[in-house]
Amino acid sequence: MQPLAQRLRPRTLADVCGQRHLLGEGQVFRRTLEAAEKTGSLPNMIFYGPSGVGKTTVAGIIAAGSGMRLHRINATTASTADIRSVLNEIGTLQGSGGLLLYLDEIQYFNKRQQQSLLECIEEGDVTLIASTTENPYFYIYNALLSRCTVFEFKSLTPDDIADGLRRAVARLNEEDDQPLAVDEDALACLADTAGGDLRKALGNLEFAAAAASPENGTRRVTLDMARQVGRRTAMRYDKQGDDHYDIVSAYQKSMRGSDPDAALHYLARLLEAGDLPSACRRLMVTACEDVGLAWPQIIPIVKAAVDAAQMLGLPEARLPLADAVVLVATAPKSNSAHDAINAAVADVQAGKSGPIPRWLQNKHFDGEDAAVKGQHYLYPHDWPDHWVKQEYLPESLRGVSYYHFGQNKTEQAAEAYWKRIKNRGDTLP
């Protein structure tokens, strides 16, 4: 009654699909594990990667070959008491191969729970193998991270998954009296729509196989069946996880890089996941940050498209958003205002401010001891071209320049205009 993915779980490293950068002949990771089988000494490790790529499988193979007593804990449901219960067994291990703790989804443990592992790991009483689907450098306590070696497990390629599916078909044929045949195009579809997740592909295969009707004594999985079970399963998306931030980052960078095709692809992934707020927010940010003063009129245009999308809701929201995404991606680019405000904020945060010049202050009474009374503000509209030379920055920042005109038609025209104005002589009207 076990799921197919569980029944097919590899028993040796050679049977694991993919991860050749770790498990290939001569790779340090594999050589370390082979040496550990002889010495009985394993390093502490953290396996990082998406679901369904072999992290738990490899940990189980390591445990089976280590001779250690294995304890498996899932951090989504475990508590500090569960860890303490495991550690209490340390004193009963005389003469055994030691204790191996496999901690799944370690990112769900808080700092205190992770700290509870430090002492036993430091002293070598417990060997830790932890797995996480999130970036360990963001989610794992530094002191624990420094005692472990991080190995990244990557999404499987369609070819890797196809190999796993062929093994699965052979296994199903061993288990059932009625032969199962999977058309090659159906197998390719199952591999392509799994999103790099072998467990997902095996689940889809098992579902399709159960629905296959016998024809001439053989159950056949066709391309149409594979498409039906694989529909909408390929996408990885968690609004709080790395996949979310990777997609929105690629979405914004594609618009900034003036690639409308890539930008539309990532927009589609956001919308298929139902994440309309992220699609709208990053679109607005990119219009302001990356097009900016090269075409300032784009900001109200994009805002109108976002308003329309939010009023329409999905799926129709894709239409105004697609218009705006293509517009932003193909627009001229300038980040001059972005750089200028960042430089100004950096100065303010560094304490570079100083008193506001008297002539810019709100009109108020000068003290009796003031050497020069009166505000002496020069009103620009009283001067030709509505401009007069006057210092506006605090004395301590005099001469500082934050904004530099960008190399685009709009900003170059503005620069030429102000050069002409500022090069004339100042005369009273």
Image (cartoon, grey):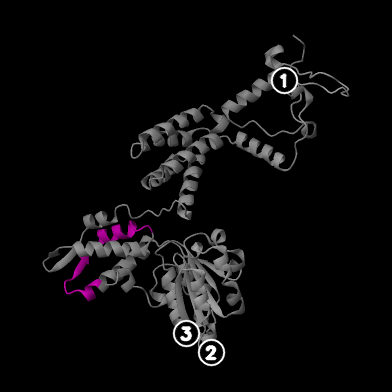
Q: Position of residue 160 (x, y in %)?
A: 37, 65
Asked where in the image residue 43 lies, by quadrant, the reply is bottom right
Query: Which residue shows up at 43% across the image and 70% down it?
Result: 56
Query: Which residue shows up at 78% across the image and 27% down it?
Result: 357
Q: Can residue 135 be seen by looking at this rendering?
A: yes
Q: Residues within 10 Å of mark 2 (few under 14, many from 20)?
A: few
Mark 1 and mark 2: Cα distance apart in space = 86 Å
Residue beneath disc 3? 67
Q: Can residue 182 be seen by looking at this rendering?
A: no
Mark closer to the observer (3, 2): 2
Residue beneath disc 1? 422
Q: Position of residue 272 (x, y in %)?
A: 36, 46
Q: Residues within 10 Å of mark 3 (few under 14, many from 20)?
A: some
Mark closer to the observer (1, 2): 2
Please tell me whether mark 2 sits on a helix, a strand or a loop.
loop
Please tell me whether mark 3 sits on a helix, a strand or a loop.
loop
Which segment did they paint magenta? Answer: 172-195
Residue in front for this viewpoint, 247 or 104: 104
Residue beneath disc 2? 94
Amino acid marked by disc 2: Gln
Amino acid marked by disc 1: Lys
Mark closer to the observer (1, 3): 3
Amino acid marked by disc 3: Gly
